[in-house]
Amino acid sequence: MKILSIESSCDESAVAVFDTAKGIELSLIHSQIDLHALYGGVVPDLASSQHLKMLPALIGRAKQECDINGVDEIVATSGPGLPNCLEMGVSAASALAMMLKKPLFGVNHLDGHAYSPFIEVHAQNPENFRSEFEGLLPHLGLTVSGGNTVLFEICTDGKLSVLAETIDDAAGEALDKGAKLLGIAYPGAPVLERLARAGRVDKNLFPCGKNRKIEDDPNFSFSGLKTSLRYYIEKLDAGRLKESLPDICASYQFAVIEQLRLRAEYFARRGKYASLGISGGVSNNSRFAEAFEGMARRSGAKFLIAPKQYRGDNAAMIAFAAFMRPDHLQEAKNATLSVNPAWTIQ
């Protein structure tokens, strides 16, 4: 079975083809980072206009590089995400489904991230993937990106349950906003990580959620961390800020990662998980990956992380999610899909 997928939930336009018997055949991504960097963050109207321009071009490339006439179904991200951006992808997918006379389905963007750590497991042994997947259950997963922070488990019966999520800013958003407060240009999180490598961590400088008992409130919260950074910066003159910037970056990054680690490890200790996976754009952060790889090792779980090209927003993970959770797809009505910008993972 072959699945053609389209992703347009934010500022990446992407098209992919996934063969359930072989793996990812094609993955095309157009990033808008350079455009939005001019404005210090994602501008929704610009993002949607770029999707309108780029999705037909990417579909055209897909036609040239593989036989899309042979696909069995078309899927598109229908939520969560920016409404106008989702509409662009869903409209393109609807037109393509009508042209190719193929069934059309909507996929939850968070399902894409949640299952992306298993893409490489499938690629290594497609024929026996289902049995290998079952051997990695129960699974503890953490999706961390600029818009989402969700801790979940996949039980041995395949059921996915959310354990905790952010009540305000996402972790990636906290890193980008923290970087902006420090005068680092968008997208700031990768630069903040680079500066942090030369810094010294002060574990007590910024709050990491220890004031809230995890057993009473397992959810994440990063808005207070950002406020703490702002108050700290206000006490420094320009010279002192420049001199201590690596240390501030290291300490702020530690506070973000430590809150993620503390809450994930609480659940890791309570359940016997066969695997632990991280996904989303923030999984590119080496300190974050190292912290969770260490946690997996201590708990005796196999550590899973998506290949680098599938950690940010991409269409390959959307096709793979359609394969993994066919019973959670949104069915098209009258050959069209509606978007759900606030669609939650469940």
Image (tube, rainbow, N blue to C red):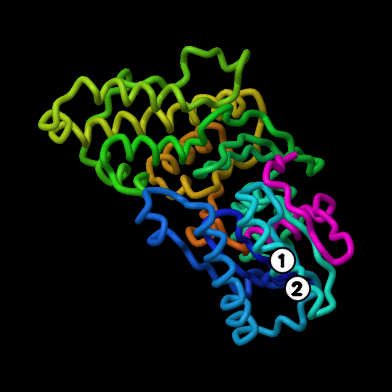
Above or below, 243 against 339 in this view is above
Q: Where is residue 159 in the image (x, y as percent from the top left)?
A: 79, 40
Mark 2 burial class by Cα count in 10 Å: few <14, some 14-19, many 20+? some
For mark 2, give the secondary structure. Answer: helix
Please say if 43 is above or below 234: below
The answer to which of 155 and 134 lies nearer the viewer is 155
Does the segment drawn in magenta span residue 331?
yes
Give whichever of 26, 74 is nearer the camera. 74
Image quarter of residue 37: bottom left
The residue carrying mark 2 is: 95
Name the residue located 53 percent from the left edge and 41 percent from the top edge.
144
Quick one: SS at disc 1?
helix
Asked if the residues shown at circle 1 and circle 2 are in contact, with their CB atoms under 8 angstroms apart, the answer is: yes
Which quadrant holds the C terminus?
Answer: top right
153 vs 219, left or right, is: right
Highlighted range, magenta? 317-346
What whole-number distance in Å separates the C-alpha atoms at marks 1 and 2? Answer: 6 Å
- Amino acid tagged 1: Ser
Residue 172 percent across, percent down from the top left: 46, 41
Point 48% across, 36% down: residue? 171
Q: Is residue 269 magenta?
A: no
Please provide percent x and percent y for residue 250: 29, 34
Q: Residue at x 27, y 21 (%)?
A: 232
Q: Residue 91 carries which label?
A: 1
Left or right: 115 as drawn, with respect to 128: left
| Residue shown at the point (84%, 78%) measured from the top left | 101
Q: Which x, y percent locates residue 148? A: 57, 40
The relative height of residue 233 versus residue 4 in the rendered view (above or below) is above
Q: How many labels does the image show?
A: 2
Amino acid tagged 2: Ala
Query: Looking at the image, which residue sits at the far front?
Result: 45
